[in-house]
Image (cartoon, rainbow, N blue to C red):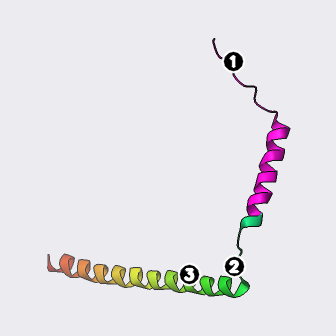
Amino acid sequence: MAEEKAKKPGITVRLRKFFRDLRSELKKVVWPSRKQVVNNTGIVIACVLLAGVVVWVLDAAFLGLLSLITSAL
């Protein structure tokens, strides 16, 4: 071969670099306040409940429609 492959650093060197980079990135994160977390959690729970109610209503409506169709036959 004309080119020689560069030797890969050892696993310990790569792990050390990974965790150093990870720590550096975590310092850049802007963490939400407790109030924001509670607020967002409430919004998510409300949206999930709303979606569940919509699915429940549609399921009941389609079941009723299917019952009407099958009883007419």
| CA separation in Å, label 1 and label 2 | 49 Å
Coordinates of residue 64 in the picture (x, y in percent): 28, 83
**Type of amino acid at the residue the image marks with label 2:** Pro
Mark closest to the chain's N terminus, 1 or 2: 1
SS at mark 1?
loop
Q: Which of marks 2 and 3 is in front?
A: 2
Q: Give the quarter of the image for residue 70.
A: bottom left
Pointer 2: residues within 10 angstroms few (<14), some, or many (20+)? Answer: few
| CA separation in Å, label 2 and label 3 | 16 Å
**Residue sitting at x 14%, y 75%:** 73
41 or 27: nearer the eye?
A: 27
**Residue assigned mark 1:** 4
Q: Which of marks 1 and 3 is in front?
A: 1
| CA separation in Å, label 1 and label 3 | 54 Å
- Asked if residue 18 lies in the magenta stretch, the reply is yes
Q: Quadrant of the N terminus?
A: top right
Mark closest to the chain's N terminus, 2 or 3: 2
Up/down of 12 relative to 59, above or below: above
SS at mark 3?
helix
Up/down of 37 relative to 19, above or below: below
Q: Which of marks 1 and 2 is in front?
A: 1
Up/down of 15 relative to 33, above or below: above
**Type of amino acid at the residue the image marks with label 1:** Glu
Q: In this view, does 55 lie to the left or right of 2?
A: left
Name of the residue lying farthest toward the front: 2
**Residue sitting at x 46%, y 85%:** 50
Residue 72 numbered mark, or none: none
Residues drawn in magenta: 1-26
**Residue assigned mark 2:** 32
Mark closest to the chain's N terminus, 1 or 3: 1
Q: Is residue 3 left or right of residue 15?
A: left
**Residue assigned mark 3:** 44
